[in-house]
Amino acid sequence: MRTALASWVAGVAATFVVLALLFLEWRLVLLAIPPLVFLAFAGMRAVPAPVLDVVREVSRDRVAAGQPVHVTLRVANRGPRLDLVELFDEIPPELDVAEGRPHIAIALDAGEEVALAYTISPRVKGAYVLGPLVARSTGASGLEYEEVVFNVRTPISVAPPMEDVRRARVQPRRTRLWMGQILSRRIGPGTDFWGIRDYAPGDERRRINWNASARFDRLLTNEVEGERSGDAVIVLDARHESLVGPLPRSTTEAGVRAAVALASKILEGRNRVGLVVQREVLDWVYPAFGRKQLYRILDALIRVRPGGEWPFDHVVWVLERFFPRNCQVILVSPLLDREAMDTVIDLAARGFAIMIVSPSPVEIERAMYAEDATLEIATRLLRMERENAVSALRRYADVVDWDPREPLAAALKGVSPFPRHG
């Protein structure tokens, strides 16, 4: 294939020929001879196509946003000598190159190997693919090249950064029969003291309250409050209407971070957790226990991108038909439109226990601009409007108004556990 330089040289020769014809001056033709000879000699030696063995290695293929990934590309020449070969390792634009370069231009003898090393840092969560590798061999004249694409691809899964909410008191409101860590306000297996009763045959000796028995001159046994588990469903509002801010710092990305942190926290309490995502399509993960469920939820959230025009009340339809009736609903939404608020009221009317974690779009948008007196007035008005909306929703749910620039744990600190029911 011809390079841009070859086209330029041919254009120069053609220009002199055209000028010679226009001005009937044969000496102008002589000026066209050198570039034509140069093109002729350059075409006498064909440029070999690269024949390479390519192996890409990454330090890890599952990382969190912001964590570095070291990439090593090993290339071996299995064909003839390449006087000049350029290697381009294609990288998605969401991945920043922190060290090194994914591009190199070198000469490769037959059988020679070269290693290309660089470090990438993902800005935002997602499922990405490194590659393919593009190899372009150029002749000594620079007029011709051969390009080959080597379809060597390496997938990388980038998870959102995990918020530390271990001390937050977030748990399902209603419990089920299986064991967990939620106090059920009923006597049963557990660790929290409930009361004292008379000893009955078969009681464990470690349950006997020896101090009370000595005081009342009869054997008395401690009773503890039973601990059970419950169901929680996290609903993430990722509609296009709910997007504010640049993608890495948007309300959607903040919502994903909150959803992962809450799922991890609730699953640690041996509860079941499910997920519903409202975006271009309506995705859901049915409630289940354990670390595998956290990975399922994480895989579903990694691919979340804002978009879609689905009515938000479809969430109510999904919850009623495919999820446990008495589950705890945790809605993660910036609450930008009336439709989201009406959905909260509808869920409360149908008997769902609701908690709302709302990444504040006002704070995200305010962080995008420099200090300005007029902007401060507008920000105060928007904050007042948001406070009124949040106050109205607190009649139906526990609302956490979260500034995504601050840790989620700080916003959840004021949340008290829901009243406990068996």
Image: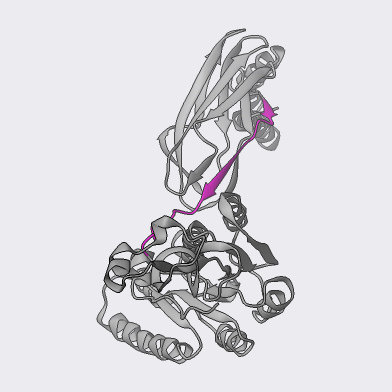
Segment tinted magenta in the rendering: 147-167
Q: Nearer the viewer, residue 269 or 345?
A: 269
Q: Is residue 24 above or below residue 145?
A: below
Whether residue 166 is visible, yes or no, is yes
Whether residue 332 is visible, yes or no, is no
Which residue corresponds to the image point at 61% horizontal and 64% vertical from the top-left?
274
Residue 35 coordinates in the image, percent (x, y): 62, 22
Residue 81 left/right relative to 167 = right
Which residue corresponds to the image point at 66% horizontal and 11% vertical from the top-left?
78
Q: Quadrant of the C terminus?
A: bottom right
Residue 236 coordinates in the image, percent (x, y): 57, 69
Q: Nearer the viewer, residue 141 or 416?
A: 416
Residue 177 left/right relative to 220 = right
Residue 215 coordinates in the image, percent (x, y): 27, 71
Q: Which residue is most to the front? A: 217
Q: Is residue 160 magenta?
A: yes
Q: Which residue is most to the right? A: 321
Residue 207 coordinates in the image, percent (x, y): 41, 61
Q: Is residue 263 above or below residue 391?
A: above
Which residue corresponds to the image point at 62% horizontal and 13% vertical from the top-left?
77
Q: Is residue 173 above or below residue 253?
A: below
Which residue corresponds to the image point at 50% horizontal and 32% vertical from the top-left?
102
**Residue 386: which quarter of the image?**
bottom left
**Residue 121: which quarter of the image?**
top left
Q: Nearer the viewer, residue 314 or 24?
A: 314
Q: Quadrant of the N terminus?
A: top right
Q: Is residue 345 magenta?
A: no
Q: How is the image coloured?
A: one colour
**Residue 340: which quarter of the image?**
bottom right
